[in-house]
Protein backbone atom coordinates (compact mmCIF):
# COMPACT_ATOMS: atom_id res chain seq x y z
CA UNK A 1 0.00 0.00 0.00
CA UNK A 2 1.56 3.29 -1.09
CA UNK A 3 -0.29 5.54 1.35
CA UNK A 4 -2.95 5.45 4.08
CA UNK A 5 -4.60 8.61 5.38
CA UNK A 6 -7.47 9.73 7.62
CA UNK A 7 -9.74 12.74 7.24
CA UNK A 8 -12.07 14.30 4.68
CA UNK A 9 -12.15 16.78 1.82
CA UNK A 10 -11.10 19.60 4.14
CA UNK A 11 -7.78 17.90 4.89
CA UNK A 12 -5.94 14.58 5.22
CA UNK A 13 -3.61 13.15 7.86
CA UNK A 14 -1.23 10.55 6.44
CA UNK A 15 -0.71 7.74 8.96
CA UNK A 16 1.43 5.38 6.85
CA UNK A 17 3.33 5.22 3.56
CA UNK A 18 4.36 7.97 1.19
CA UNK A 19 4.55 11.50 2.69
CA UNK A 20 4.04 10.25 6.25
CA UNK A 21 5.38 12.78 8.77
CA UNK A 22 6.52 12.43 12.37
CA UNK A 23 5.30 11.19 14.72
CA UNK A 24 3.27 8.80 12.52
CA UNK A 25 5.37 5.73 11.79
CA UNK A 26 3.20 2.79 10.64
CA UNK A 27 -0.33 1.38 10.83
CA UNK A 28 -1.78 -2.13 11.19
CA UNK A 29 -5.43 -3.14 10.68
CA UNK A 30 -7.50 -5.71 12.54
CA UNK A 31 -11.08 -6.71 11.68
CA UNK A 32 -13.43 -7.99 14.40
CA UNK A 33 -16.25 -9.27 12.20
CA UNK A 34 -17.47 -9.31 8.62
CA UNK A 35 -20.73 -8.71 6.78
CA UNK A 36 -22.25 -5.71 5.05
CA UNK A 37 -20.49 -3.65 7.74
CA UNK A 38 -17.16 -4.30 9.36
CA UNK A 39 -16.05 -3.58 12.91
CA UNK A 40 -12.36 -2.73 12.62
CA UNK A 41 -9.49 -1.06 14.40
CA UNK A 42 -6.23 0.43 13.18
CA UNK A 43 -3.15 0.48 15.40
CA UNK A 44 -1.02 3.54 14.75
CA UNK A 45 2.56 3.73 15.99
CA UNK A 46 3.66 7.22 16.99
CA UNK A 47 7.37 7.98 17.36
CA UNK A 48 8.64 11.52 17.93
CA UNK A 49 8.90 14.26 20.49
CA UNK A 50 6.25 14.47 23.21
CA UNK A 51 4.93 17.66 21.55
CA UNK A 52 4.63 15.91 18.17
CA UNK A 53 2.77 13.00 19.76
CA UNK A 54 0.40 15.38 21.57
CA UNK A 55 -0.33 17.17 18.29
CA UNK A 56 -1.02 13.82 16.57
CA UNK A 57 -3.40 12.77 19.36
CA UNK A 58 -5.20 16.09 19.03
CA UNK A 59 -5.62 15.49 15.28
CA UNK A 60 -7.01 11.98 15.82
CA UNK A 61 -9.44 13.22 18.48
CA UNK A 62 -10.67 15.90 16.06
CA UNK A 63 -11.38 13.19 13.50
CA UNK A 64 -13.43 11.30 16.10
CA UNK A 65 -15.36 14.45 17.00
CA UNK A 66 -16.04 15.23 13.34
CA UNK A 67 -17.39 11.73 12.77
CA UNK A 68 -19.83 12.27 15.62
CA UNK A 69 -20.79 15.70 14.30
CA UNK A 70 -21.41 14.24 10.83
CA UNK A 71 -23.70 11.60 12.35
CA UNK A 72 -25.61 14.48 14.02
CA UNK A 73 -25.72 16.42 10.70
CA UNK A 74 -23.64 19.26 12.16
CA UNK A 75 -20.56 18.61 10.01
CA UNK A 76 -20.64 18.38 6.24
CA UNK A 77 -18.23 15.55 5.47
CA UNK A 78 -18.05 11.90 6.55
CA UNK A 79 -14.73 10.84 8.01
CA UNK A 80 -12.82 8.52 5.69
CA UNK A 81 -9.95 6.13 5.53
CA UNK A 82 -8.14 6.89 2.28
CA UNK A 83 -5.97 4.28 0.58
CA UNK A 84 -3.66 4.65 -2.41
CA UNK A 85 -2.55 1.19 -3.57
CA UNK A 86 0.07 2.48 -6.04
CA UNK A 87 2.16 5.63 -6.24
CA UNK A 88 0.38 8.10 -8.50
CA UNK A 89 -2.63 5.78 -8.72
CA UNK A 90 -6.28 6.11 -7.79
CA UNK A 91 -7.51 6.70 -4.26
CA UNK A 92 -10.10 4.53 -2.50
CA UNK A 93 -12.14 5.52 0.52
CA UNK A 94 -13.96 3.82 3.37
CA UNK A 95 -16.48 5.81 5.42
CA UNK A 96 -15.84 5.32 9.14
CA UNK A 97 -18.23 6.00 12.01
CA UNK A 98 -18.65 5.27 15.73
CA UNK A 99 -15.02 6.29 16.22
CA UNK A 100 -13.17 6.13 19.53
CA UNK A 101 -9.52 6.20 20.46
CA UNK A 102 -7.48 4.34 23.06
CA UNK A 103 -3.79 3.65 23.74
CA UNK A 104 -1.38 1.06 25.11
CA UNK A 105 -1.55 0.70 28.94
CA UNK A 106 1.81 2.40 29.59
CA UNK A 107 1.09 5.36 27.31
CA UNK A 108 1.53 7.80 30.25
CA UNK A 109 5.19 6.81 30.41
CA UNK A 110 5.92 5.98 26.76
CA UNK A 111 4.47 9.33 25.60
CA UNK A 112 7.19 11.23 27.43
CA UNK A 113 9.82 8.83 26.09
CA UNK A 114 8.79 9.58 22.51
CA UNK A 115 6.62 6.65 21.50
CA UNK A 116 3.02 5.54 21.79
CA UNK A 117 0.74 2.91 20.30
CA UNK A 118 -2.82 4.15 19.78
CA UNK A 119 -5.85 2.31 18.44
CA UNK A 120 -8.67 3.90 16.46
CA UNK A 121 -11.86 1.80 16.64
CA UNK A 122 -14.64 2.28 14.09
CA UNK A 123 -17.32 0.72 11.93
CA UNK A 124 -17.16 0.90 8.15
CA UNK A 125 -18.97 -0.59 5.14
CA UNK A 126 -17.35 -3.76 3.86
CA UNK A 127 -16.20 -2.04 0.68
CA UNK A 128 -14.13 0.84 -0.68
CA UNK A 129 -15.21 3.65 -3.02
CA UNK A 130 -13.06 5.41 -5.59
CA UNK A 131 -12.99 9.06 -6.62
CA UNK A 132 -16.11 10.47 -8.23
CA UNK A 133 -16.24 10.30 -12.05
CA UNK A 134 -18.84 11.63 -14.49
CA UNK A 135 -20.72 9.07 -16.57
CA UNK A 136 -21.50 9.56 -20.28
CA UNK A 137 -25.25 9.41 -20.93
CA UNK A 138 -27.10 8.18 -24.00
CA UNK A 139 -30.69 8.79 -25.05
CA UNK A 140 -32.99 10.96 -27.14
CA UNK A 141 -30.72 14.02 -26.88
CA UNK A 142 -27.42 12.39 -27.79
CA UNK A 143 -24.93 9.55 -27.44
CA UNK A 144 -22.19 9.40 -24.78
CA UNK A 145 -22.96 12.94 -23.59
CA UNK A 146 -21.00 14.46 -20.70
CA UNK A 147 -21.36 17.91 -19.17
CA UNK A 148 -25.17 17.97 -19.23
CA UNK A 149 -27.79 15.70 -20.82
CA UNK A 150 -31.12 17.25 -21.85
CA UNK A 151 -34.43 15.71 -20.80
CA UNK A 152 -38.06 16.33 -21.77
CA UNK A 153 -40.68 15.33 -19.23
CA UNK A 154 -42.17 12.40 -21.14
CA UNK A 155 -41.16 9.61 -23.50
CA UNK A 156 -43.11 8.69 -26.62
CA UNK A 157 -42.63 7.94 -30.30
CA UNK A 158 -41.13 11.37 -31.05
CA UNK A 159 -37.36 11.08 -31.33
CA UNK A 160 -36.76 14.29 -29.37
CA UNK A 161 -39.02 13.39 -26.44
CA UNK A 162 -37.15 11.51 -23.73
CA UNK A 163 -37.29 11.46 -19.93
CA UNK A 164 -34.66 8.75 -19.46
CA UNK A 165 -30.89 8.41 -19.84
CA UNK A 166 -28.86 5.24 -20.39
CA UNK A 167 -25.53 4.38 -18.81
CA UNK A 168 -23.94 1.65 -20.93
CA UNK A 169 -22.63 -1.43 -19.17
CA UNK A 170 -19.08 -0.88 -20.42
CA UNK A 171 -18.95 2.56 -18.76
CA UNK A 172 -19.75 1.20 -15.28
CA UNK A 173 -16.26 0.13 -14.20
CA UNK A 174 -17.10 -1.13 -10.73
CA UNK A 175 -16.94 -4.48 -8.94
CA UNK A 176 -19.94 -3.81 -6.66
CA UNK A 177 -23.09 -1.65 -6.88
CA UNK A 178 -21.71 1.89 -6.81
CA UNK A 179 -23.26 5.06 -5.35
CA UNK A 180 -24.48 7.71 -7.78
CA UNK A 181 -24.51 11.49 -7.61
CA UNK A 182 -27.34 13.11 -9.57
CA UNK A 183 -27.27 16.79 -10.51
CA UNK A 184 -30.64 17.72 -12.02
CA UNK A 185 -30.94 21.29 -13.28
CA UNK A 186 -34.36 22.84 -13.91
CA UNK A 187 -33.94 24.36 -17.37
CA UNK A 188 -37.65 25.22 -17.75
CA UNK A 189 -38.77 28.85 -17.52
CA UNK A 190 -42.55 28.45 -17.64
CA UNK A 191 -43.22 27.06 -14.16
CA UNK A 192 -41.30 26.06 -11.05
CA UNK A 193 -40.32 22.49 -10.26
CA UNK A 194 -41.70 20.77 -7.14
CA UNK A 195 -41.71 16.96 -6.89
CA UNK A 196 -39.10 14.71 -8.50
CA UNK A 197 -39.16 10.93 -8.90
CA UNK A 198 -36.01 9.05 -9.92
CA UNK A 199 -35.76 5.35 -10.74
CA UNK A 200 -32.94 3.15 -12.07
CA UNK A 201 -33.43 -0.06 -14.07
CA UNK A 202 -30.49 -2.47 -14.37
CA UNK A 203 -30.15 -5.30 -16.86
CA UNK A 204 -27.18 -7.05 -18.48
CA UNK A 205 -28.68 -7.00 -22.00
CA UNK A 206 -31.80 -4.79 -22.10
CA UNK A 207 -31.02 -1.19 -23.04
CA UNK A 208 -34.33 -0.05 -24.56
CA UNK A 209 -37.07 1.98 -22.88
CA UNK A 210 -40.30 1.11 -24.72
CA UNK A 211 -41.44 -1.56 -22.24
CA UNK A 212 -41.78 1.09 -19.51
CA UNK A 213 -44.23 3.37 -21.36
CA UNK A 214 -47.72 2.51 -22.63
CA UNK A 215 -49.30 5.27 -24.69
CA UNK A 216 -53.02 5.70 -25.37
CA UNK A 217 -52.84 3.77 -28.65
CA UNK A 218 -51.46 0.73 -26.76
CA UNK A 219 -54.22 0.75 -24.13
CA UNK A 220 -57.74 -0.57 -24.64
CA UNK A 221 -60.97 0.81 -23.21
CA UNK A 222 -63.04 3.86 -24.00
CA UNK A 223 -62.40 5.93 -27.12
CA UNK A 224 -59.12 7.14 -28.57
CA UNK A 225 -58.70 10.73 -29.77
CA UNK A 226 -55.94 12.71 -31.43
CA UNK A 227 -54.55 15.95 -30.04
CA UNK A 228 -51.10 17.50 -30.43
CA UNK A 229 -51.09 18.44 -26.74
CA UNK A 230 -51.20 14.82 -25.56
CA UNK A 231 -48.33 12.43 -25.02
CA UNK A 232 -47.74 10.75 -28.40
CA UNK A 233 -50.51 13.04 -29.70
CA UNK A 234 -53.22 10.60 -28.60
CA UNK A 235 -55.41 10.25 -25.53
CA UNK A 236 -58.17 7.93 -24.44
CA UNK A 237 -61.44 8.83 -22.72
CA UNK A 238 -63.52 6.29 -20.84
CA UNK A 239 -66.98 6.99 -19.37
CA UNK A 240 -69.00 5.01 -16.84
CA UNK A 241 -71.76 5.34 -14.25
CA UNK A 242 -71.69 2.95 -11.29
CA UNK A 243 -71.20 2.89 -7.54
CA UNK A 244 -69.32 -0.43 -7.87
CA UNK A 245 -65.76 -1.14 -8.97
CA UNK A 246 -65.74 -0.84 -12.77
CA UNK A 247 -62.98 -1.92 -15.19
CA UNK A 248 -61.90 1.09 -17.29
CA UNK A 249 -58.61 0.42 -19.07
CA UNK A 250 -56.45 -2.55 -19.97
CA UNK A 251 -52.82 -2.77 -21.04
CA UNK A 252 -51.45 -6.12 -22.18
CA UNK A 253 -47.74 -6.80 -21.63
CA UNK A 254 -46.20 -9.44 -23.87
CA UNK A 255 -44.36 -12.46 -22.50
CA UNK A 256 -41.07 -11.09 -23.86
CA UNK A 257 -41.55 -7.75 -22.08
CA UNK A 258 -42.63 -9.49 -18.88
CA UNK A 259 -39.37 -11.47 -19.04
CA UNK A 260 -37.39 -8.23 -19.39
CA UNK A 261 -39.25 -6.65 -16.47
CA UNK A 262 -37.57 -9.49 -14.58
CA UNK A 263 -39.82 -9.88 -11.52
CA UNK A 264 -38.88 -6.50 -10.09
CA UNK A 265 -40.98 -3.80 -8.42
CA UNK A 266 -42.43 -0.89 -10.40
CA UNK A 267 -44.65 2.06 -9.55
CA UNK A 268 -47.39 2.58 -12.17
CA UNK A 269 -47.97 6.26 -12.97
CA UNK A 270 -51.13 7.16 -14.88
CA UNK A 271 -50.80 10.49 -16.68
CA UNK A 272 -54.10 12.33 -17.11
CA UNK A 273 -54.66 14.17 -20.36
CA UNK A 274 -57.10 16.43 -18.51
CA UNK A 275 -57.61 16.63 -14.77
CA UNK A 276 -60.86 15.33 -13.35
CA UNK A 277 -62.98 17.15 -10.75
CA UNK A 278 -64.43 14.27 -8.71
CA UNK A 279 -63.92 14.35 -4.91
CA UNK A 280 -64.94 10.68 -4.50
CA UNK A 281 -62.94 8.83 -7.16
CA UNK A 282 -60.72 5.84 -6.33
CA UNK A 283 -58.64 3.76 -8.72
CA UNK A 284 -56.93 0.41 -8.41
CA UNK A 285 -54.77 -1.90 -10.47
CA UNK A 286 -55.44 -5.59 -10.95
CA UNK A 287 -52.99 -7.90 -12.68
CA UNK A 288 -54.91 -10.23 -14.94
CA UNK A 289 -54.49 -13.26 -17.16
CA UNK A 290 -57.56 -13.03 -19.35
CA UNK A 291 -60.56 -12.95 -17.01
CA UNK A 292 -58.57 -14.42 -14.11
CA UNK A 293 -57.21 -12.16 -11.37
CA UNK A 294 -53.56 -12.76 -10.49
CA UNK A 295 -53.31 -9.91 -8.02
CA UNK A 296 -55.61 -7.13 -6.80
CA UNK A 297 -53.68 -4.12 -5.51
CA UNK A 298 -54.60 -1.60 -2.87
CA UNK A 299 -56.80 1.22 -4.22
CA UNK A 300 -55.65 4.84 -4.23
CA UNK A 301 -57.58 8.08 -3.96
CA UNK A 302 -57.56 9.94 -7.28
CA UNK A 303 -57.00 13.44 -5.91
CA UNK A 304 -58.65 16.02 -8.23
CA UNK A 305 -55.82 18.45 -7.42
CA UNK A 306 -53.29 16.20 -9.20
CA UNK A 307 -52.79 15.67 -12.91
CA UNK A 308 -51.48 12.14 -12.42
CA UNK A 309 -52.11 9.05 -10.31
CA UNK A 310 -49.38 7.25 -8.36
CA UNK A 311 -50.32 3.62 -7.75
CA UNK A 312 -48.79 1.32 -5.12
CA UNK A 313 -45.83 -0.76 -6.32
CA UNK A 314 -46.47 -3.90 -8.34
CA UNK A 315 -44.18 -6.82 -9.15
CA UNK A 316 -43.93 -7.89 -12.80
CA UNK A 317 -44.42 -10.75 -13.24
CA UNK A 318 -46.33 -11.13 -9.97
CA UNK A 319 -44.81 -13.59 -7.50
CA UNK A 320 -41.54 -15.53 -7.95
CA UNK A 321 -41.31 -17.94 -10.89
CA UNK A 322 -39.12 -20.95 -11.56
CA UNK A 323 -37.69 -19.13 -14.63
CA UNK A 324 -37.38 -22.38 -16.53
CA UNK A 325 -39.47 -21.03 -19.44
CA UNK A 326 -40.77 -17.65 -20.55
CA UNK A 327 -43.25 -16.08 -18.14
CA UNK A 328 -46.84 -15.78 -19.26
CA UNK A 329 -48.11 -12.48 -20.59
CA UNK A 330 -49.93 -10.24 -18.08
CA UNK A 331 -52.59 -7.55 -18.41
CA UNK A 332 -52.68 -4.45 -16.23
CA UNK A 333 -56.32 -3.55 -15.61
CA UNK A 334 -57.30 -0.20 -14.13
CA UNK A 335 -60.59 -0.14 -12.23
CA UNK A 336 -62.52 2.84 -10.87
CA UNK A 337 -64.89 3.35 -7.96
CA UNK A 338 -66.94 6.55 -7.82
CA UNK A 339 -68.77 6.54 -4.53
CA UNK A 340 -71.90 8.44 -5.57
CA UNK A 341 -72.41 6.31 -8.68
CA UNK A 342 -72.95 9.37 -10.90
CA UNK A 343 -71.80 9.46 -14.51
CA UNK A 344 -68.07 10.13 -14.83
CA UNK A 345 -65.29 10.14 -17.38
CA UNK A 346 -61.51 9.99 -17.31
CA UNK A 347 -59.04 11.04 -20.01
CA UNK A 348 -55.52 9.58 -19.98
CA UNK A 349 -52.61 9.53 -22.41
CA UNK A 350 -49.94 7.30 -20.84
CA UNK A 351 -49.29 4.60 -18.26
CA UNK A 352 -45.63 4.53 -17.16
CA UNK A 353 -43.77 1.98 -15.01
CA UNK A 354 -41.14 3.57 -12.76
CA UNK A 355 -38.47 1.05 -11.59
CA UNK A 356 -38.23 0.91 -7.81
CA UNK A 357 -35.27 -1.42 -7.17
CA UNK A 358 -33.01 1.64 -6.94
CA UNK A 359 -35.22 4.71 -6.64
CA UNK A 360 -35.84 7.89 -4.68
CA UNK A 361 -38.63 10.42 -4.47
CA UNK A 362 -38.13 14.07 -3.61
CA UNK A 363 -41.29 15.70 -2.26
CA UNK A 364 -40.78 19.43 -2.67
CA UNK A 365 -41.77 22.07 -0.14
CA UNK A 366 -39.66 24.89 -1.62
CA UNK A 367 -39.89 25.54 -5.37
CA UNK A 368 -37.05 25.25 -7.86
CA UNK A 369 -36.86 28.05 -10.42
CA UNK A 370 -35.11 27.93 -13.76
CA UNK A 371 -31.38 27.13 -13.42
CA UNK A 372 -31.76 25.76 -9.87
CA UNK A 373 -30.18 22.32 -9.40
CA UNK A 374 -31.14 19.36 -7.23
CA UNK A 375 -28.03 17.50 -6.04
CA UNK A 376 -28.43 14.01 -4.58
CA UNK A 377 -25.21 12.35 -3.44
CA UNK A 378 -25.75 8.73 -2.37
CA UNK A 379 -22.13 8.39 -1.19
CA UNK A 380 -22.47 11.30 1.25
CA UNK A 381 -26.13 10.47 1.94
CA UNK A 382 -27.11 14.10 1.37
CA UNK A 383 -29.36 15.98 -1.02
CA UNK A 384 -29.86 19.71 -1.46
CA UNK A 385 -30.91 22.28 -4.00
CA UNK A 386 -28.37 24.79 -5.27
CA UNK A 387 -30.15 28.04 -6.05
CA UNK A 388 -28.60 29.90 -8.95
CA UNK A 389 -29.85 33.39 -8.13
CA UNK A 390 -28.32 33.52 -4.66
CA UNK A 391 -25.51 31.09 -5.35
CA UNK A 392 -26.46 29.16 -2.22
CA UNK A 393 -27.96 25.83 -1.24
CA UNK A 394 -30.73 24.67 1.07
CA UNK A 395 -32.87 21.65 1.70
CA UNK A 396 -36.00 21.85 -0.43
CA UNK A 397 -37.34 18.30 -0.52
CA UNK A 398 -38.26 15.43 1.74
CA UNK A 399 -36.24 12.54 0.33
CA UNK A 400 -37.68 9.05 0.45
CA UNK A 401 -36.00 5.89 -0.78
CA UNK A 402 -32.63 4.21 -0.63
CA UNK A 403 -29.35 5.07 -2.31
CA UNK A 404 -29.26 5.41 -6.09
CA UNK A 405 -26.83 2.78 -7.34
CA UNK A 406 -25.06 1.77 -10.53
CA UNK A 407 -24.71 -1.99 -10.98
CA UNK A 408 -21.61 -3.64 -12.48
CA UNK A 409 -21.76 -5.28 -15.91
CA UNK A 410 -25.30 -4.04 -16.51
CA UNK A 411 -26.98 -1.37 -18.57
CA UNK A 412 -28.50 1.19 -16.22
CA UNK A 413 -31.39 3.38 -17.38
CA UNK A 414 -32.29 6.37 -15.23
CA UNK A 415 -35.89 7.58 -15.21
CA UNK A 416 -37.02 11.07 -14.21
CA UNK A 417 -40.57 12.23 -13.48
CA UNK A 418 -40.96 15.96 -12.77
CA UNK A 419 -44.03 17.65 -11.28
CA UNK A 420 -44.73 21.38 -10.98
CA UNK A 421 -46.35 23.38 -8.17
CA UNK A 422 -49.78 22.66 -9.67
CA UNK A 423 -49.13 18.92 -9.18
CA UNK A 424 -48.98 18.36 -12.92
CA UNK A 425 -46.42 16.43 -14.93
CA UNK A 426 -46.15 19.12 -17.59
CA UNK A 427 -44.97 17.06 -20.52
CA UNK A 428 -42.87 19.70 -22.29
CA UNK A 429 -40.92 20.63 -19.17
CA UNK A 430 -37.17 20.43 -19.72
CA UNK A 431 -34.28 19.57 -17.41
CA UNK A 432 -30.58 18.90 -17.72
CA UNK A 433 -28.86 16.11 -15.80
CA UNK A 434 -25.31 15.11 -14.97
CA UNK A 435 -24.58 11.75 -13.35
CA UNK A 436 -21.47 10.72 -11.44
CA UNK A 437 -20.42 7.52 -9.72
CA UNK A 438 -17.72 6.19 -7.42
CA UNK A 439 -16.30 2.77 -8.43
CA UNK A 440 -16.78 0.35 -5.54
CA UNK A 441 -14.65 -2.69 -4.69
CA UNK A 442 -14.64 -5.21 -1.84
CA UNK A 443 -10.87 -5.70 -1.56
CA UNK A 444 -7.94 -3.48 -2.47
Image: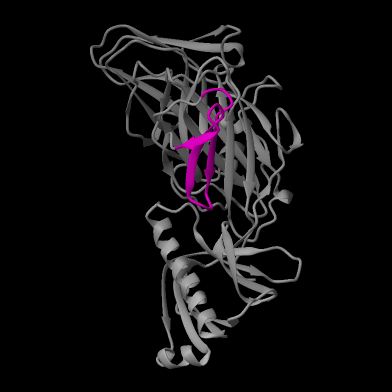
Quarter in which the C terminus is drawn? bottom right
Q: Indicate whether residue 225 is drawn in magenta.
A: no
Q: Position of residue 155 (x, y in %)?
A: 61, 25
The region drawn magenta spans 369-394
Write down the quadrant of residue 3 in the picture. Answer: bottom right
Q: Position of residue 229 (x, y in %)?
A: 57, 9
Decide: is 59 above or below 46.
above
| Residue 407 visible in image | yes
Quarter in which the N terminus is drawn? bottom right
Question: Seen in the image, is 328 located left or right of residue 342?
Answer: right
**Which of 438 and 159 lies nearest the eye of the viewer?**
438
Q: Position of residue 434 (x, y in %)?
A: 64, 38
Write down the quadrant of residue 279 in the picture. Answer: top left
Q: Indicate whether residue 392 is drawn in magenta.
A: yes
Residue at (40, 32) in percent of width and height: 292
Residue at (63, 64) in percent of width and height: 92
Decide: is 356 above or below 35.
above
Write down the quadrant of residue 366 in the picture. Answer: top left
**Which of 409 and 371 lies nearest the eye of the viewer?**
371
**Which of 16 and 399 lies nearest the eye of the viewer?**
16
Residue at (27, 16) in percent of width and height: 280
Amino acid sequence: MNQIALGDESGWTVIAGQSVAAPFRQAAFFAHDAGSTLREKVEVQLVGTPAQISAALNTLEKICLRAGAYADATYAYPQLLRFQPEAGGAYYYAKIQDLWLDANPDHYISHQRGSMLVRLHYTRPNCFDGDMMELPLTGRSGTDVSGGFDLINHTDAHSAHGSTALVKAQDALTDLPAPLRIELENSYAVSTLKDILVGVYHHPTVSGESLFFANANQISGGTQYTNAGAINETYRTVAWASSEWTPLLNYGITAADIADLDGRAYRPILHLYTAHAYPDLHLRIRLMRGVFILQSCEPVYADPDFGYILFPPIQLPPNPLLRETLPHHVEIQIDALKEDGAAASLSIDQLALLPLDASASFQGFYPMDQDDTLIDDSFRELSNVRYSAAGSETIAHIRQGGPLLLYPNQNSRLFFVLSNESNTIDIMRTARVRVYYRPRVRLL
